[in-house]
Image (cartoon, rainbow, N blue to C red):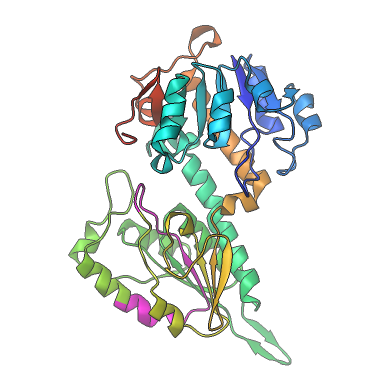
Amino acid sequence: MKISVLKERRAGETRVAATPETVKKLVGLGHTVTIESGAGTVAGFPDSAFTEAGAAIAAGAAAAAAGADIVFKVRRPEPAEIAALPEGSALIALMEPFAYAADEVAALNARKIAGLSMEFTPRITRAQSMDALSSQSNLAGYRAIIEGAQIYGRAMPMMMTAAGTVAPAKVFVMGAGVAGLQAIATARRLGAVVTANDVRPAAKEQVASLGAKFIAVEDEEFKAAETSAGYAKEMSPEYQAKQAALTASHIAKQDIVITTALIPGRAAPVLITEAMVHSMKPGSVIVDMAVSQGGNCPLSKADEIVDVNGVKVAGFSNLPARLPADSSSLYSKNLLAFLPLITGEGGKLNLDTDDEIVKAMLLTRNGATVSERLK
């Protein structure tokens, strides 16, 4: 098959959907790979590295996509990019399915594009190597702590010197999913005193295993707060009120707070109220990782650092893009792992909807919207 990799055009996006390492493997499998010129430059992968790995370089999206059976991207394409995709080709990307407008879906269907969303990779054992949300969230959690530490402007670990003792930073991570657990681990490695919370009971043991203290209202609702797919359920207003009271007293003592709570297809829940922000010490930092879906703090703004009486509220809408080389490397390997599921005999494209992974990820096909979740 011919596989094309297009350059990302959305503001602030530095990642690329292939690396020289994965290109070499794709070519070794018998595929032809074409990379749009400059697609990997910002991530540290020049065109020359791709050509050495066996890829062809094309100038512009239309030239790169011409004749492609499969198109790899990081983010969902803009309307102009959709127009450049070959009719009937397969597009695999982080499609942001819940953000799709009707005209964008119509544009995909007009060209009979088979759109596959990496966000809809099922959380099953067989699909772990394809789980792009996890691979990118892992790096996002790491980067959130690095950004928070930089904004905080003080030392993270305890330091005992002849001139006096520097107290360790207190870090509170709200949400112990993939991103939260990595944030906890990173903050611990930097020497901070770390606490964390989550509505999922299973998270308590995971948090403790990383050396952090778990903070939560552990009632009956808490014990049943996880879906069969491993996601957090939205909690009742009563539980949220109890958890908010506990959080309010705890958060006032923290130096850095990382919020990670996201619900697929829904606005991010508010975890930190304006009153909680005002209760924090000047110099404290909040890093809102959910700002792209409205934010866990109503004061956060996308890609801005807001000063609230000395408390810095930072909203980073695309933390993985701040580690483009590693993010691209992991994401491209997710794509490489998924490819055999849609490759039939003789290396032909075969979208086997009997496979639960392919079926879950498929949004559009043959001019129709096939995903019930997208509908």
Residue 320 in picture, x, y percent from top left? 58, 50
- The answer, for residue 115, to whether it is visible in the render is no
Residue 79 x/y as whole percent: 53, 33
Residue drawn at x 30%, y 78% as measured from the top left: 245
Residue 197 horizontal/vertical position (percent): 38, 67
On screen, residue 248 versus residue 283, left or right, reads left
The answer to if 249 sits in the magenta stretch is yes
Residue 267 is drawn in which quadrant? Answer: bottom left
Image coordinates for residue 220, horizontal then vertical, percent: 18, 64
Residue 285 vertical placement versus 78 (above, below): below
Q: Quadrant of residue 293?
A: bottom left
In this view, the residue farthest toward the left is: 220
Please identify the quarter of the rendering in which residue 196 is found: bottom left
- Determine the residue positioned at 65% across, 23% down: 62
Instruction: Tell me if residue 237 comes above or below residue 346 in the rendering.
Output: below
In magenta, the rendered stretch is 245-266
